[in-house]
Amino acid sequence: MVALTVFARQLQRHLVKQVRLPVSLRSVQVRRCNLSACSSRFVLSQMHPMWQEPLEVPGGERQSPIDISIRKSVFDPNLKPLVTRYDPRTCQQIWNNGYSFLVEYDDRTDKSTLHGGPLEDQFRLCQFHFHWGENNNWGSEHTVDRHLYPAELHLVHWNSDKYSLFEEAVMEDNGLAVIGVFMKVGKRHEGLQKLVDALPAVRHKDSVVEFTKFDPSCLLPQNTNEYWTYAGSLTTPPLTEAVTWIIMKQPIEVSHDQLAVFRSLLFTSAEEEVQKSMVNNFRVQQSLKDRTVRSSFNPFLHNAVTNDP
Ligand SMILES: [Zn+2]
């Protein structure tokens, strides 16, 4: 998942939530890219600089992402259905943060929430984002029996029963709950299209565009009762082990053209000479160590291995 660093997040809140400039003023996108950047013939595709040096994780006993082994997952009949209550009016903006694009929600009140499933507390939606590859053969962070999907959606929520801010929750054991949804290539996803249409406005790093009235529940699969859950971490720095992961078994379908628009975004800002395609923005997989992945469904009765993926 994409965690903003605490400071970046605070800065962003300061700029956007407290000052609340009109979009036209806070949008970096209004700045035209200079001729050399726009005419650059070379758009590089390579691993993001964030991962060029190994990152130390203190402890590091519950890192993410992981491979989910269907056979080794343990059916837990006590896992409840997930309950999402999202208010589209809390949707605010899209931000290209140089690693992914974040669709951000007003999380000052309990208007868009998640509870149930493996969770004891109520969690508040703050943003969702995606990870994807340079082609359709890879891109997801989690895998199922080593199967890679071309993209993965992360809906990020923080524990509003125990904490008062995302910045507090991100450092704590039971601070975050992230829903992961695999994306496979198939027919066009009508719900996603409104977001896809807005993406050219945030092509460059640091650009922000107003984006409102988007209900993220349209991006959940039809069947949200079947999921895996495990204790893990953020998949971007600070990599804190704060996350209860809830990974949907059923993927959603999106078209190749929709993913192509994701890949047309850039890791780089408008003024950088060599532009870099925003692709392969996933973390390498981590070992399961002493953890159990629980499933809300009986893995021996399901046919995901043969039919899906
Ligand atoms: Zn993510």
Image: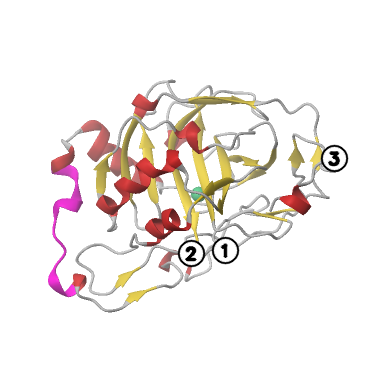
Query: Camera-side residue: 292 or 192?
Result: 192
Give the residue type that dot 2 points to: Asn
Whether residues under marks 1 and 2 lie with C-beta atoms below 8 angstroms apart, the answer is yes
Q: What mark, if any, has residue 280 been given in the picture?
A: 2
> Where does label 3 land, which residue?
301
Mark 2 vs mark 3: in front: 3
Label 2, residues with CA under 10 Å away: few <14, some 14-19, many ≥20: many
Classify mark 2: helix, strand or loop: loop
The x, y position of residue 159, in whole percent, is 52, 29
Whether residue 48 is visible:
yes
Left or right: 155 with respect to 268? Answer: right
Instruction: Answer above or below: position of 81 versus 233.
Output: above
Q: Say which label, 2 or 3, has the lower sequence index.
A: 2
Establish if 170 lies above or below 108.
below
Determine if the magenta segment contains residue 29: yes
Total numbered labels: 3
Q: Residue flagged by tag 3: what amino acid is it?
A: Leu
Q: Position of residue 282 (x, y in %)?
A: 52, 59
Q: Identify the secondary structure beneath mark 1.
A: loop
Question: Mark 2 near mark 3, Cβ–Cβ under 8 Å?
Answer: no
Picture disc at residue 138: 1
The amino acid type found where label 1 is placed reads Trp
Residue 146 percent location from the top left of the image: 70, 60
